[in-house]
């Protein structure tokens, strides 16, 4: 298994961990726990919108020993039944009656039926609350009520930002078992970046309309000295809409947009020629990003890029504190001013990215936060 960048080998800190969720590619948590856990089971939930199938990986003493693809139909309601079936089957198959393990999950569905499951297996749930959905939607309201219901009855609770911590508790909790824990960063070897006449911006990950790529396209139309690499994917209708807009604005030659997923191991080379990452989120409080720690931002900094982002999410104070980027409004003038400010003192921002990454370094940040999971 590949090492975690600059991390050095250490003893195994944890006995048995079961990671379950759709956010496992964010925050380097799988790579961290696979390094420090004697037995780690990972259940990847890829959701109903992706063609790829859910799968399970088994690590033993830091080595990947098994990968199993699961049959989970993509129809939303039916998908939940199959996911829950595989969840129960995985617990029964990979953990025996005498083993005690911690289940770390972001989803309330995995609390259902646990009073019965705990009669045949010994485990505790670590609920990493990553969502707050202030939506009038009936289904979202049910989902939110489940989060509160199970959170209030659970011993071990983590929060992907202080706002979530406050919402769930009515006050900011910071105890051994209940505290804010944001995404960690893997320290990567950084490549030297020289400023070119043509500045290339970067966008990574899942693409939604709320991410503001249309604003970035208009920015390119106004400033011929700019390019953009879009290293992510979206649905076919949004891809067609953006492709038409790119053509209408006459910027096709300065846009890389293949509408595909880029594995983490490919990002270093793809981003090595880029100047900064952009994250132009809607700043409305009805946007879930407002309450949490978006994975895109830390992926940019992990690969050495400062960030230009809007004034939303729990990560903004840290971007400002470490000077790891610039905060801009969702308009082309503000974004271009941020680019010019960065360009005039780029070394300062690269140093800020380094300091930011060191603060959230998995080796120290996660190790301190997860002390309660350690083997006695």
Image (tube, grey):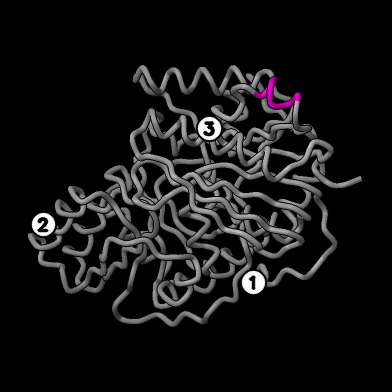
**Residue 163 position within the rendered picture, expressed as x and y whole percent measured from the top left:** 56, 31
Secondary structure beneath label 3: helix
**What is the secondary structure assignment of the residue under circle 2?**
helix
Q: Position of residue 206 (x, y in %)?
A: 36, 51
* Residue carrying label 2: 244
Magenta region includes residue 116: yes
Q: Is residue 339 left or right of residue 33?
A: left
What span is in magenta? 114-119
Q: Which residue is drawn at 36% across and 32% down?
A: 76
Of mark 1 and mark 3, the one earlier in the sequence is 1
In terms of image quadrants, where is residue 121?
Answer: top right
Instruction: Specify the label residue 139 is tagged with.
Output: none
User: On the image, numbered disc 3 is attached to which residue?
Assistant: 84
Q: In this view, does 159 lie above or below 281?
A: above
Name the residue nearer the viewer: 227 or 112. Answer: 112
Could you tell me which residue is drawn at 67 percent across and 62 percent down? 358
Outermost residue, right side: 376
The residue that label 1 is drawn on is 2
Residue found at the very far left of the displayed protein: 248
Q: Which of marks 1 and 2 is nearer the N terminus?
A: 1
Q: Are marks 2 and 3 in contact (CB under 8 Å)?
A: no
**Which badge, 2 or 3, is on the more N-terminal residue?**
3
Between circles 1 and 3, the one closer to the viewer is 3
The residue lying at 10 percent from left, 66 percent from top is 250
Q: Which of 189 and 315 is in front in this view?
A: 189
């Amino acid at each position: 298994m590949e090492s975690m960048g600059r991390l050095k080998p250490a003893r195994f800190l944890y006995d048995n961990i079961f990671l379950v969720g759709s956010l496992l590619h964010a925050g380097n948590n799988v790579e961290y726990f696979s390094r420090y856990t004697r037995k780690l089971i990972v259940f990847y939930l890829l959701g109903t919108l992706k063609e790829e199938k859910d799968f399970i990986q088994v690590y033993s003493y830091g080595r990947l020993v098994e990968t199993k693809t699961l049959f989970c139909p993509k129809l939303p309601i039916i998908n939940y039944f199959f996911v829950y079936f595989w969840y129960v089957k995985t617990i029964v198959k990979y953990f025996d009656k005498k083993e005690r393990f911690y289940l770390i999950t972001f989803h309330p569905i995995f609390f259902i039926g646990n009073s019965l499951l705990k009669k045949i297996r010994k485990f505790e749930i670590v609920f990493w609350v990553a969502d707050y959905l202030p939506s009038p939607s009936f289904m979202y309201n049910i989902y939110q009520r489940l989060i509160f219901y199970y959170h209030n009855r659970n011993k071990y609770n983590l929060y992907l930002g202080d706002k979530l911590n406050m919402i769930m508790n009515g006050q900011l909790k910071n105890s051994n078992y209940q505290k804010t824990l944001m995404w960690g960063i893997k320290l990567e070897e950084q490549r030297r970046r020289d400023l070119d006449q043509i500045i290339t911006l970067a966008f990574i990950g899942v693409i939604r309309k709320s991410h503001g790529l249309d604003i970035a396209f208009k920015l390119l139309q106004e400033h011929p000295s700019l390019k953009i690499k879009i290293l992510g994917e979206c649905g076919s209708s949004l891809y067609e809409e953006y492709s038409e807009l790119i053509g209408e604005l006459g910027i096709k030659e300065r846009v890389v947009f293949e509408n595909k997923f880029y594995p983490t191991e490919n990002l270093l080379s793809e981003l090595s020629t880029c100047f900064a990452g952009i994250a132009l989120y809607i700043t409305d409080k009805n946007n879930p990003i407002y309450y949490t720690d978006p994975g895109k931002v830390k992926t940019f900094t992990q690969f050495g890029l400062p960030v230009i982002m809007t004034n939303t999410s729990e990560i903004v104070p840290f971007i400002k504190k470490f000077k790891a980027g610039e905060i801009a409004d969702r308009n082309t003038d503000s974004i271009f001013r941020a680019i010019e400010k960065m360009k005039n003192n780029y070394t300062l921002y690269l140093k800020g990215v380094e300091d930011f990454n060191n603060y959230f370094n998995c080796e120290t940040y996660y190790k301190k936060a997860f002390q309660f999971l350690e083997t006695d």
